[in-house]
Image (cartoon, helix red, strand yellow):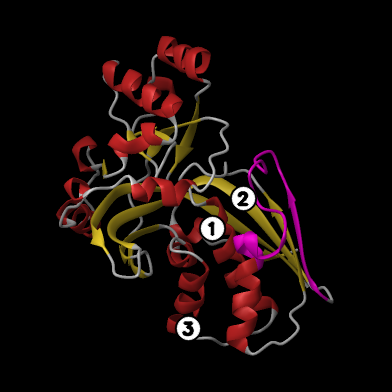
Amino acid sequence: MRLELVAPAKLNLTLEITGRRQDGYHDIVSVMQAIDIVDHVRLDDAPTLELEVTGESQLGVPIEGPRNLAFKAAQVLAAAAGIANPGVRIQLEKNIPAGMGLGGGSTDAAAVIRGLCNLWRLDLDAIALNGVAASVGSDVPFFLHAGTALVTGRGEQIEPLPDVAPLTLTLFGATLEIEDKTRRMYSTLTPADFSDGRRSHVLAESIRRGLPITETDYHNAFDRHIGAIAEPLARSMALCREAGLAVIASGSGPSFFAPIPLESVPTTLLRELERSWGVHAIACHSLPRALATTMREV
């Protein structure tokens, strides 16, 4: 049997940090949203556990063993299911840029978990699957559900929300390799960056009630720290704001997005970002849960 799964990127419509935990992680409150920049994950029966990485965004993606979260997910799921010698060929077609705060590795891992439950005919309950996902990476549990969700704890507590009204957004990124990005970004946080999570809970309630998302609803605690690891992106965010655009970091950065269509971004600004900082813009859209978790036999 061969399965093909969609593995979408995500944006954090809000990302609040409520404090540092004793285990070294931070507690977050975030409204996450799947978007239509997607990797494609293919799973084939195989005698051993194998991994192949292709695609235009494979730069910076680990291609060996447990350093790759998709490979690690297969190992962890097999251990949880009591499978001593797991066999599957994992093919990742990478379209999500690595290290940009979009969850590319985590979404691949979640797709592998969902796909292997089908391929291996596993009957693990939701709590067990969430535990497998959380042990692979903090963002992986969100991608088991995708769509729109309120995410708390260190990322393992997921409350799926109704699909939002379609969002058209502009994502800004650059080709950068940043070593140990997530740890470094979290190390920049101070108590001044901590909040009570209220903004995220307010947005989640608005989504439950079917209200539209407004420009003032977006928030990210990492916005002011992007320059610590990616000066070109921080300068680009400043230029966008000077031009009157509201821009918000994607996850822990350093990519960022504006809640407007690409065609609404001034052409002169796009040219300046590309010329001065190597930052490019692409259009993206919110992805409803049904499309974000697509799996088919091929």
60 shown above or below 246: below
Query: Which residue was labeled with disc 1?
Result: 107
Mark 3 touching mark 1, by CB under 8 A? no
* Residue at disc 3, secondary structure: helix
> What is the number of the mark on residue 128?
3
On whether residue 60 falls in the magenta region, the answer is: yes
Q: Residue 248: x and y, percent?
A: 32, 36
Q: Dot 1, how many residues are within 10 Å of its Cα: few (below 14), some (14-19), or many (20+)? A: many
70 shown above or below 282: below
Mark 3 touching mark 2, by CB under 8 A? no
Q: CA distance from mark 2 to mark 1?
A: 8 Å
Q: Residue 243: x and y, percent?
A: 30, 16
Query: Which residue was labeled with disc 2?
Result: 39
Name the N-terminal-most of marks 3 and 1: 1
- Residue at the spot x=32%, y=37% of the render? 225
Mark 2 touching mark 1, by CB under 8 A? yes
**Range of the magenta residues?**
48-71
Q: Residue 289: x and y, percent?
A: 45, 59
